Structure formats: structure tokens, C-alpha cells
Image (cartoon, helix red, strand yellow):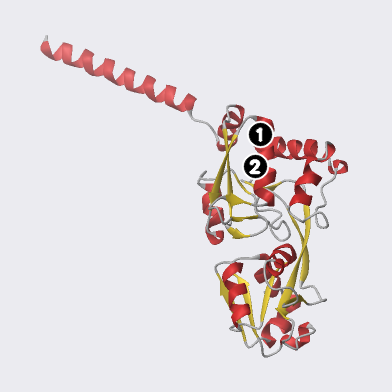
Amino acid sequence: MKKLLALLLCTAMTAFMLTGCGDGAQDAKSPAEAVSREDGDRTTFTVGFDAEFPPYGYMDDNGEYVGFDLSLAQEVCDRNGWELVKQPINWDTKDMELSSGAIDCIWNGFTINGREDSYTWSVPYVDNSQVFVVAADAGIASQADLAGKVVAVQADSSALAALNNEENTALTESFASLNQFADYNTAFMDLEAGAVDAVAMDIGVANYQMESREAGKFVILDEYLSTEQYGVGFLLGNESLRDQVQNTLFEMVEDGTFAKIAEEWGLSDVVCLTADAE
């Protein structure tokens, strides 16, 4: 009798376990389904950004994270009823932050060109160029004059990618050295101190850095290293969140808010987002 009871109990437990496993399988979601479900119930929006990339994203004198991109993101959140979470990240670990779900997007002067198939992108909103900044009295007037000079660039940046591009091989090989920095603030301080001869960087960032220092001390070479466009980068396949953010940006363009924010940050000349992009 005891053996019979034990057998019945074992059978019942096995059936319960199998049923439980079946329910778990039904609850499991594919990545796309999980993203869709999350966006429907979203209350926060976490933006990953480089905190040393003014005027797009940086820490101001009051210890607050500010910038053009963060102002845009705040307006997007306000219109969607989300809380904006500003998450500073190391630029060379941005992909890990995005794929792990630690951030919802990369929004910080993020170049589309060359990365088109790596992310789900918004439409471009800034036309940007990579340039060289040199001291005004350095006697450097063209890219040819950079031969034998020490050039600085941010690690894993668009400027570095441009310098490593095959079409710029001869130029890069002419440098005495190409020094990589964690951020452009540090690179610019080395330029100011004479430790490097030039900095390759985004023109918007270059203008900001120059305006915050002694007038006429630095110049941008007329020859651009490359041209590019900025977009908001989302996890590949997350079109639902991309569309929601992008549609809100279009609304901001139509009612003039986008242009107003660009003017506040001195970027009216480089923004390219229009309602026609829809």
C-alpha cells in the first residue's frame, strides 16, 4: 500500500512540474516581444551619453548633466509622460550598455555613417563634420602641414574612424604620432599646453571648446577630414521605441520647439531635421 501511495505521489509531482514548465514557456518572450511590451508600459527613458562631449552632453559648473541632446531628450520625455534618466557611459562600452538594457538608446552626437547596420536609427538631425583644430600661431594652415606633428583624437570616435579610413591613410601615416584620449576636454587641454599640435574632432564640439577659451587662440583648418550625420541609436530591431521618439521629434520640428532648442545651444547652423523627413 505504501509503495502504491508513493508511486501516485511521484506521478502527481511529475505532472505538476511539467505543467509548471509549460506555463513558463508560454510566459517567455522573444526580444522583440519584450521590447514591445516594455514600450507600452514605459515610465522612464534612459539615455546613454558621453559626459565629456559638449555641447551635446556634459556636466556643467553646477554638477548637472546638460547639453543639446539631453535638452531634446527631456522634451521628448515631457511629451510622452516619461521620466528622463541621464546615464553617462564610457564611449568605448556603449554597445555593451545598450545590449544589456542598461540604456534605451545612445543619444550624444552619435554618428550614423559607417554604423548604419549596427543599430536601429532615427532619421539624421544634425549634419556634422570632422575637423582639425590647431593653435592660431602654430604655423599650421593645411592638412599637409600636419606632417611630423602630434595629433590628438578621442578613442572610438568618428574622427578616429575617419583617420583610420583607407582614403586618409597617407595623411595619418604622415603624423609623428596619433594620441588617443578618453575625452576631448583632456585632448584640448593638451593642445592648449602644447603637448599636441592638433586635435581631430567634431566641428560642433570644436566650436564649443574654442568659444569657451581665449578668443582667436585656436583655429579650424579649412579642409574637413570628413562629413557625417548624427542620429539617435537604438538596439537593432527596436523600431517601436525608435518610432515613438522620432515621431515626437517631428512634432517638435513642426511647432518650432526643435529649432528653439538648437538656437539655445548655438547649433542652428548644423541641425538638419525637417518635417519633410517623415
Name the residue furthest top.
1
Residue 124 visible in the snapshot: no
The kind of residue on which mark 1 rests is Asp
Instruction: Quote the CA–CA distance across marks 2 and 1.
Output: 25 Å
Q: Earlier in the sequence, mark 2 or mark 1?
A: 1
Q: As drawn, is 20 to the left or to the right of 240?
A: left
The kind of residue on which mark 2 rests is Gly
Name the residue furthest left.
2
Q: As drawn, is 19 to the left or to the right of 177?
A: left
Image coordinates for residue 209, horizontal then vertical, percent: 68, 67
Residue 170 visible in the snapshot: yes
Q: Quadrant of residue 278?
A: top right
Q: As drawn, is 53 to the left or to the right of 11?
A: right
Residue marked by disc 1? 78
Q: Quadrant of residue 225?
A: bottom right
Q: Nearer the viewer, residue 141 or 247?
A: 141
Image coordinates for residue 156, horizontal then vertical, percent: 60, 66
Residue marked by disc 2? 237
